Image: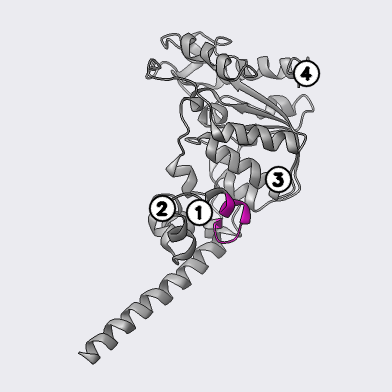
Amino acid sequence: MKKFLLFVSKILLVILLSAVVLDVLYTAIYLQSSKRNKIEYVYNSQCKNFDVAFLGSSRTQNHMKAKLFNDKGITAYNFGMSGSKLDETALMLKLMLERGYKIKNIILDVDLNLNSNAYSDGVRAMYMPYLTCSPTIQNHYKTIPEYNKLRYIPFYRYLANDAKIGLREVFFSLVGKKSNSLENFGYFPLSGMGKNMSYELSDYTPKRNFAYEEIKTICKKNTIHLIAISTPMCQECDSNTYFNAIKSVYPEVYNYENKVTDDKYFSSCGHMNVAGATLFTTIVVNDFIQNKFKN
């Protein structure tokens, strides 16, 4: 029996040591990578200056052509992330400030994310490589139920999020393979038109959002001009009720939902193609230059 227990103990020790080694190795690779996604780009950079930073979900990533701002001499970058909820967006802003970013204006797409206080498993996973290194990320996630397991069990956070930060992604980060999420000043273009041209919003209701409230507080504290907007949907989407209701909850949100309506500008109902993004961003940049966004 003693031999068996000793054998089991040795196996457990080997597993533990392997987990520690793999955890250190994976983390070291992510700490030197800045070409795969916007989170690691921000984490592994510092002291950048922007006149405008775009934040939000795919409806920011696919709609805001930062180049059109840069062409006007307005230093801009699109930090929108597909699937991101306002919770992950708030953490992105915190990371920027932790890294010494200087930001004058933030244009934040809040529209559909005001429907709930949800979070994104996929985007949250991409913050996990830095959980043991960043006090900002630790403080943001310290109240979630699985925090202690993610923070203190070696390699657990990588196993639990293998699809996003597992072996495949570690390998691409190690060899420095670039992803297209960082091209075009962070804007990701969509092609084609007229696919899935319907979107059901009847069950959507804008409500108070904790993360958006936090973003507003952070911006006020750091003297950042926050511009919250809603962006266009296709014609088949009966979105007027929802988007108009946003004003009753957050009157400061600028409603651009009907600024682009023709279906030829949409790749899908909730996402504009290149032509639509170009038209929409041109409208926003002109409003910005004309100082239509008041503090």
Q: Find the distance from the CA under tag 1 to the CA under tag 3.
A: 18 Å
Residue at image mark 4: 289
Relative to residue 46, is residue 102 depicted above or below?
above
Name the mark nearer the viewer: 3 or 4: 3
Circle 2: residue type:
Asn
Circle 3: residue type:
Leu
Q: How many marks are shown on the rendered structure?
A: 4
Disc 3 crowd, CA 10 A, few/some/many (<14, 14-19, 20+): some
Q: Tell me which label, 1 or 2, sits earlier in the chain.
A: 1
Relative to residue 174, is residue 88 depicted above or below?
above
Q: Find the distance from the CA under tag 1 to the CA under tag 4.
A: 38 Å
Q: Find the distance from the CA under tag 4 to the CA under tag 2.
A: 42 Å
* In the image, residue 9 lies in the stretch drawn in magenta: no
Labels 1 and 2 touching (C-beta < 8 A): yes
In the image, the segment drawn in magenta is 130-139
Quadrant holding the N terminus: bottom left
User: Residue 60 placed where, x, y %?
Assistant: 57, 28
User: Residue 239 placed where, x, y %?
Assistant: 46, 12
User: Residue 179 placed where, x, y %?
Assistant: 53, 44
Main structural element of the magenta stretch: helix, strand or loop? helix
Circle 1: residue type:
Met
